[in-house]
Each structure stands twice: as structure tokens, then as C-alpha cells.
Image (cartoon, rainbow, N blue to C red):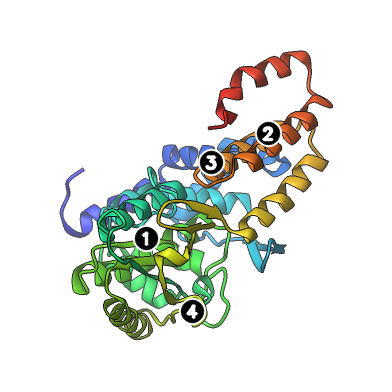
Amino acid sequence: MARAGNAFMISLYDEICDYKNLESAFKKARKGKTKRMYVKAFEALLEDNLLKLQHELVNHTYSPRPLESFILRDGKTRRISRSDFRDRVVHHALCNVIEPILEKGFIFDSFANRKGKGVLKALERFDFFKRKVSKNHTRECFVLKADIRRYFDNVDHNKLLQIIAKRLSDERMLWLIRQILGNFKTTEGKGMPLGNLTSQFFANVYLNWLDQFVKHILKARYYIRYVDDFVILSNSKAELEFYKRQIGDFLEDHLLLQLHPDKSRIIKLQQGVPFLGMRVFPFHRLLLRKNLDKFKRKWRVFGKHLDSENYDETYVFIEGWLAFAKTANTFGLRKRIIRDFENASMNFISIKDVNRYLKEEKIFKLS
């Protein structure tokens, strides 16, 4: 749909409010949660609920409901804030429309919360870069491994809105984004809640400014970012020290953020670089202990309460983690996990379910 100037932007807000878009957003919001009571309650009066949301959006009377917050302890203590289901529908409706436009400006090597990307793709890209930089492991390779101090807590709302307004200047759309951002703050005008779809997307929008600086101003060729966790590979330690200083200054001056003082350092590849739950070496990867401990804690919860109600959810969780762990040296570990899952499943599933499981076992195939 090629339209010029502000007319194009106005039509985008109309797309957000369109009933078909809201219906599509509902389907995305309920994915994996169809058995939850709040989803069933919303779906029981689906048309009424969507029309009410549409009316509020069109007339600018929409206001998000208070977030439900809880503490998650999975190696570190984090505060997770969950939006009301009707607000999650709005988040999907917004992202359905603006994500395809804003993502066109993202660099290739940004891997978080994007279709066709993800943790495994980021690790594959790291492997490709380490071979390029080290000339197939014949030259020394250094890695700047860095992340941003309390990133989600320190995202500045006004800065984020300025970044978005450069591409989407429609005031009605910016009003909706202000409503979403204003529903949470750590300090005045700062912070995004962990757990929201919009937070995940806006995290990429905000740091895309950093990506552009690193790739086009610093001209760092071997750069990978996953949310606020990023690496740059080089043969020169001095070059990486220069990059680190420049990035630190850029973050403070332009994005009001700081590099994490303890987690931002330059490491020889031979020593092993911690990245996305792995420790990456020249010829292999190992699982980080904290990643394994996190999995074990979650599996204990699933395994203890495994029954026909949460079997599919548990199966997807196990399948996804095994696909991740398979990229490291974990043959024996994965074998034990498959056996434990098999034993837990056999305690309650029917012969029919057992046969289905056996047919699907190729997903768990060890190699």
C-alpha cells in the first residue's frame, strides 16, 4: 500500500483499529493459552470484547489495566509484569501493523524476537564469524562480550518515542504507544516491563540506533546482538578496546544507558566466551552452568505436575530445550532428560498417546 506522507501514517492507525486486525491479534495472544480461564472468558464474548476495544481505540478512550507483577527466581531475581489479556490483544494489534515497517530498518545481525532468527541462529552466526576472524583458527581471535546495565529498567520513554516518530509520525499511533509505555515505570519516564510483547519489540527498536552506530560509524564487521547482549569479534584487542569506549560513550550520550561494568570485557576465544547460555570455544560449545540449573528447576516443576492437561506444553518445552542443548557437548545429558520425560509420561498417558509419542520420537533423536 504505497501512500505518501501523513496520509500513509493515518491509514496505519486505522489498520490497528480494524476489526480483522483485532481478531488476528486475539488469535496470536491466545496461542498456547487456550485452556486459561481468562482466555475462555474473553472468547465467550469475543465479538463484544473486540468491538469494545475497537471503540476505545478509535475514540482515544483506551487505557491499559494495571499490570500483574510477580517475582521470578531462576538463578537471578527478576520482576515480571504481565498485562491483562485484553491489553495483550492491543499489543499484538499494534505490532501486527508497525513491526513490518520498523523491522525493515534493523540490521541482519540482530537476532532477538524476530522471525527466522533466535538463539540458535545467533550462535551459528557466532561460529561463522569466529572462523572468518581466526582464518579457520590459524590466527588469534578476541571477543568483546558486553551487555547493558539494567536495560529494560532504563529505557527512556521520550527517547523511544523520538526514535519511532522518525519512521511513524502519526500522532494517533504515538498516543497509543504512550498509553502502553505509561502503564509501567521504574523511575519517572523510564522502564519497560519484562514479559510484554511490546517490550520485546521496542527493545529492538531502541537498540537499533546502537546497531547502526556500530555497523556504519564504527564499521565493526563482526557484530551480533541479542536484546542487550552483544559481541564483536576481532584479531585486535586494541581495536575492541576502542570499540568498547566508543560504544560506552554513545550509549550514555544518545540512549541514556550504560554498559554493564562487570559483564563487558574482552576475552580470548580460546578461553571460552559466555554467550546466550553457552560458553563458546574455537571448536566446541559447553552449556553454562546457570543455564542448565535454570532448565532443571523448570523441569522439576513440569515433571512433578505432569498430566494430560499440561503434557503438550511440557513436550514443547522439552523439545525446544533439547534442540538448543544439542548444539553443545551434551549427549549424555540429553539422553537422561529423554529417559526422565519418557518415564514421567508413561505414568499417565494412554496407549494411544504412547504410540503418538513414539511416532514423534524422531524429534528427540540423539546425534
Disc 4 target residue: 260
Q: Is residue 306 above or below residue 115?
A: above
Q: Is residue 175 visible?
A: no
Q: Is residue 25 visible?
A: yes
Q: Is residue 169 above or below residue 266?
A: above
| Sequence-first tag of 4 and 3 | 4
Disc 3 target residue: 326
| Sequence-first tag of 3 and 2 | 3
Disc 2 target residue: 338
Q: CA distance from mark 2 to mark 4?
A: 37 Å
Categorize mark 1 by other alpha carbons within 10 Å: few (<14), some (14-19), many (20+).
many
Foreground of the two, 48 or 353: 353
Disc 1 target residue: 173
Specify the amino acid type for callout 1: Met
Q: CA distance from mark 3 to mark 2?
A: 12 Å
Q: Which of label 1 and label 2 is nearer to you?
A: 2
Q: CA distance from mark 4 to mark 3?
A: 30 Å
The local secondary structure at tag 3 comes to loop
Q: Position of residue 234 (x, y in %)?
A: 28, 68
Specify the amino acid type for callout 2: Ile
Specify the amino acid type for callout 3: Lys
Q: Position of residue 172 (x, y in %)?
A: 36, 62
Q: Which of label 2 and label 4 is nearer to you?
A: 2
Categorize mark 3 by other alpha carbons within 10 Å: few (<14), some (14-19), many (20+).
some
Residue 238, image quadrant = bottom left
The local secondary structure at tag 2 comes to helix
The local secondary structure at tag 4 comes to loop
Q: Position of residue 87 (x, y in %)?
A: 56, 54
